[in-house]
Image (tube, rainbow, N blue to C red):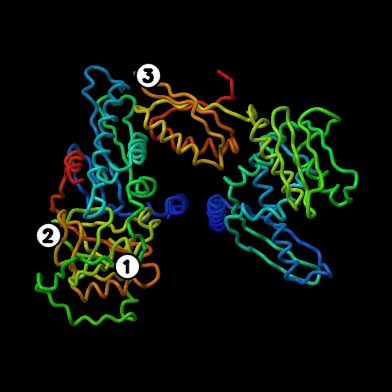
Amino acid sequence: MNKFKWIFCIIILVCLMASAALAREVSLSLPADEELSSMALREKAMAKGFAKAVVSEAMTMLPGKLDTKRIELLQKYYVTHAKPYIQGYKILTSKISEQGVYIGLDVNVNRKNLRQALKSMGLFTTSVSPVKASVAYPDDLDEQTMETLQGLVILTGVKPTEDGMPVFSLEHGPEKTYKARLTTEDKEWLSIQKDLSVAWFNVWKRYFSHEASIGIKVGTKKLIVAGWFSPDAVLEFDRVLRGWESAVQEVQLVEMDMQSSGVGGTWDLRLLSSEKFDMLLKSYLPQRGLTYHLSEEGEE
Amino acid sequence: MPLRIILLSFAIFLVFPCWAAAFQGHVQQFNDGAVITWGDGNLSVIRNMASPGEARVVNPLAVRKAVTSARKQLLDMILATRIDSKRTVSAYLSADRSLAARVRGMVQNSPMELPDMYDAGGQVRVYERFRGKLAELVMPNTLPYQSGIPPKLSTSMEEQFDYNESQIEVTNSGAIRYTGIIVDARNLKVTPCLAPTIYGQDGLGAYGVFMVSRGNAIQKGVVAYSTTSDPAQLRSRVGSNPLIVKALNAYGSWRTDLIVSTPMAKLMRAIMSAPGIAGDSRVVIVLSDNEIASVETAEEHSQDQ
């Protein structure tokens, strides 16, 4: 019986310690490659590990779900573009053998920067519904470039149409560059880059920030909190709420209700983790004499 | 020991490690049962609710009145607290309106304890802590955290105090065995503050924010104030083998800083150079139990500016 008690005790301690860790753990293995040294193979595995961590973090942020193909393409994209979003990492395991490399990483992802990047890439919009656009490209495009372009179209969530706006057109630029142009009814954006994906996202970033992201409110909730005695307290809670970014995002104070009986506030926000948010609200509000109600957007 | 007690202790230690290790320390009393405990940095104000008359159930308006009044006093206590010898929190915040609004907002969101529903004549208690978020707001960014450059007084104190500890030999190997420092400043009428400096008689700083990172100053406090010099009771802060140093005098117009003998100051610097000592702010200043700490309102302090 005593033995059982100690095992139970250890399990609780491990659970408590695990819940305190916020970083994302990933592991992956790569088979040996004759053309790569073991160090180069290890570096390749690490780059893929970072990409995997960034993508799994991205999946918790997006309002809609991506299909397998898009997740695969996003991971491929982040193998070379994950660096700005890695705050730190720990190598948990690293085994190099004749069969290949196995690596385990504990990666800290910069959620704020990643969220901004995903918005720029249009994934916040197109994870909910695709964007219709005409895509034009020169006939003499080589196979690899064509494959990259098709990958970008799928990754971004563009549904190609015969005509209509917006129109994306790709041309060859000077000195082996790509000239990407995106035209809408009232605007036109142009980017000339050596890397096709950079040129692609440069123009679409402008488009999404200009038009498409407006009005997307999937997963939006309304939080009503009451019981304050001063408007300063509401503004302070607004700051606290914005700091809970692993549980909610797109927090916006939409109304402050000042009555003789007290002050209340209403927020629009998008839930990332309802369990975590519930836990945070319960640990913050009741001990300050505050009550709350969380409802779907538009619900009374 | 029953299993649930062991589990509870472990859980508390894991979830609130610094609280578990904290001690109350010197208690600065204010009017109406308000206190600052300078060991763990807690501030709390208690208010009795208005006489209930015949009503038994707690009246929400009475709660509001009591909480509002308690929070007002809590804010006054925070504003009246001295950051260092030069300024109070009030003086610091007067230069930054948005920061002042944030402190007000935090106080207006301070946790509280309410009486039971049927205890109409009961008490409310509001509290905050000079650690974490609040300390982040009231500790100026401009203090020379961990600069490693000791401040220097304009005049040396060598001739002012007849105190001779010149026999103490300072060696790094000797200093290594100490795990922290207890500065005995009893009967010196010291005013507790958030970032005091301890000087040697030679006028050179021996300990202060110049040795502590901003993160540690915010999370642990630069020093803790206590009314006991018993190392056993201060173990959580200064470790098992602290050096006990006698302060010769308090310094500054508000008597926030301390002067110790030059050899002791040298020994303190040597101890602080050991890894983890200054980093963990392992310094306790001992004040007299009956020392009446100065209590001023924020308005009086604003005249300092």
- The quadrant of the picture occupied by the N terminus of chain A is bottom right
| Residue A18 percent across, percent down from the top left | 57, 53
Chain name for mark 2: B
Judge depth for marks 3 and 2 and give the one in front. 3
Judge depth for marks 1 and 3 and give the one in front. 1
Instruction: Work out whether residue A5 or residue B50 is closer to the camera in this orientation and state it.
Output: B50
Q: Which residue type does callout 3 highlight?
A: Gln
Q: Is residue B183 left or right of residue B275?
A: left
Displayed quadrant of residue B182: bottom left
Is mark 1 in CB contact (under 8 Å) with mark 3? no
Q: Which residue is mark 2?
A: B187
Give the label on residue B149, or none.
1
Give the label on residue A259, or none.
3
Q: Earlier in the sequence, mark 1 or mark 2?
A: 1
Rendered residue at 21%/80% (across/down): B168
Q: Helix, strand or loop at disc 3?
A: strand
Q: Which residue type does callout 1 highlight?
A: Ile
Q: Are marks 1 and 3 on the same chain?
A: no
